[in-house]
Image (cartoon, rainbow, N blue to C red):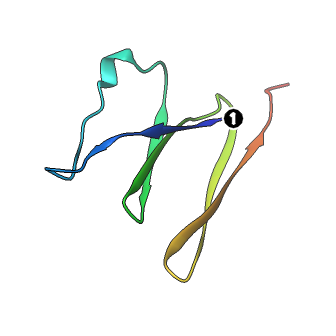
Amino acid sequence: MRLSDLEINPSTMRLEVDIMEQKGSFAIVVCDGKAKLTELPPFGETNIVTHQGKVKRIRWNEGEEF
C-alpha cells in the first residue's frame, strides 16, 4: 500500500514528521483527524479526490520518460 499512517498526538493534536528520514518528494494528507503520508512518483500525477469536503481516495497516474 502506498499510504502510510502517521500518528497524531491525541493530547496536543500535533503531527510530527522527521522530513530527513523521508526519501524524495512526499505528500501528507489530513482529514477527519487522520493523517497519511505518500511518496510522490518520479514521473506522474497524484490526485486527491474529495467528496463533500472530505478525502475520498488518492489515485496515482505514473509514466516514464521516453
Q: Nearer the viewer, residue 66 or 47?
A: 47
Which residue is depicted at the point 79% across and 26% down? Answer: 65
Label 1, secondary structure: give it.
loop
Which residue is depicted at the point 85% across and 25% down? Answer: 66
Q: Position of residue 7 (x, y in %)?
A: 35, 40
Q: Residue furthest left?
A: 12
Q: Which residue is mark 1?
A: 1
Q: Position of residue 12 (x, y in %)?
A: 14, 50
Q: Residue furthest right?
A: 66
13 relative position to 42: left or right: left
Q: Quadrant of the N terminus?
A: top right
21 relative position to 57: left or right: left
Residue 40: quadrant of the picture: top right
Residue 34: quadrant of the picture: bottom left
Q: Position of residue 15 (x, y in %)?
A: 26, 43
Q: Residues within 10 Å of mark 1 (few under 14, many from 20)?
A: few
Query: With respect to residue 19, does 31 lie above or below?
Result: below
Query: With respect to residue 55, does 52 lie above or below?
Result: below
Report the number of discs: 1
Which residue is depicted at the point 47% across and 42% down? Answer: 27
35 relative position to 62: left or right: left
Q: Nearer the viewer, residue 3 or 62?
A: 3
Residue 43: quadrant of the picture: top right
Q: Position of residue 28 (x, y in %)?
A: 43, 45
Which residue is depicted at the point 67% across and 46% down? Answer: 45
Q: Nearer the viewer, residue 29 or 62?
A: 29
Q: Residue furthest front?
A: 11
Callout 1, which amino acid?
Answer: Met
